[in-house]
Image (cartoon, grey):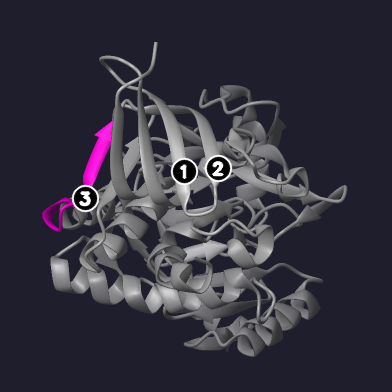
Amino acid sequence: MSLPLEETGCVVIGAGVIGLAVARRLARAGQAVVVLEAEAHIGEHLSSRNSEVIHGGLYYPPGSLKAETCLRGKALLYEYCAARGIAHRRCGKWVVASPGQTGALEDLHANARAAGAEGLSLVSRERLRREAPWLRAEQALESATSGIVDSRGLMASLAAEAENHGAVIALRHRVTHIDCRPGRFTLTVEGPDQPFQLRAERLINAAGLGAVPLTGLLDGLPEKHRPEQRFAKGHYFKLRGKPPAERLIYPLPDADGLGVHLTLDLAGGARFGPDVEWVERPDYRVDESRRESFEQAVRRYWPGLPAGALHPDYAGVRPKLWLDGKPYRDFLIQGQGEHGIDGLVNLLGIESPGLTAALALAERLKEHA
């Protein structure tokens, strides 16, 4: 029995912040857009389970997609939030160096400057003692342009704007197969009522944690363009009481993350996270047994953390790409120039700083169509 067939100009798979930013841009350009989201709400995974930080672009190699889209996205995001009344705050950030780490901090400073980051300055030990005597640090790198944003408010605004320009956002719609031909994509979709097929001229895979598995459903995509994906779970613990600072406080980054850092929220509270736990599949349960390791991590730069001040908050999972048996630490955008299929764009490995970079990634799609 044949399934009902609908047609549209473009399908975006995934209604996280990236998919919604893409849908908004395409709809504003006059394209007929359908967004398919498997969950019951927008932004259920990566987009709402992060630190909600607007990143300053310190960490990423100059010329990388992460560096370029983070910096461009930051400017676009501040402008977008200010114009639409989305809650945000340019609170600034310190990356702190413990004794013996000043060389690594200077390397980070040099990288950030080479990448084009702005609002940078080194904070002396004397200034640290004067302004933040609670900190154990020899030096800090200040990023004055870093901030925080209401991620759910941002996504709600992007969704509303996309819909106001004619986009359709279909929740509880899961893609089960894609017949992939140049300029014509036929998707089999399971919806709340009955399965159907949806045909489009363009297909944007912005499925977040599901983006790499989705490449396995693309009948016609060469196998070499299906990378391996692993999952890095990160826990967050909330701080009881008043935060010790009015800016973000970060340790120096490690190989797989930015370290357990102090993040403020827009309600005046604070949380610490994320740590890194490698898992086989996404899992959002908070492991309370990790409290002790969190306290140890925090006390490396805040020795006076009160006993019992941390309590479980939430967890998130980040996609980590592996290519040719090695970690691939940049965003991966596959367009026709990479896989040869007209109209298909895969957005893979979009983890931090994806929230900051969302509007810039949407802007870049014209380069990869």
Q: Which amino acid does label 2 sit on?
A: Cys
Residue 330: where, in percent of width, then height?
67, 62
Q: Name the residue under label 3.
A: 167
Amino acid type, residue under disc 3 in the picture: Ala
Q: Is residue 335 left or right of residue 263?
A: right
Density class for disc 2 (Cα within 10 Å; few <14, some 14-19, many ≥20) is many
| In this view, 1 is above or below 217 | above
Q: Which residue is drawn at 78% across and 71% down?
A: 101
Contact (Cβ within 8 Å) of mark 1 with mark 2: yes
Q: Give residue 185's mark.
A: 1
Tell me if 357 is positioned left or right of 292 in this view: left
Write the residue at 26% across / 77% down.
79
Q: Distance between the Cα atoms at labels 3 and 2?
A: 22 Å
Q: What element carries label 2?
A: strand
Q: Which range of residues does the magenta coloring cover?
A: 163-171
Q: Earlier in the sequence, mark 3 or mark 2?
A: 3
Looking at the image, which residue sits at the far top? 1
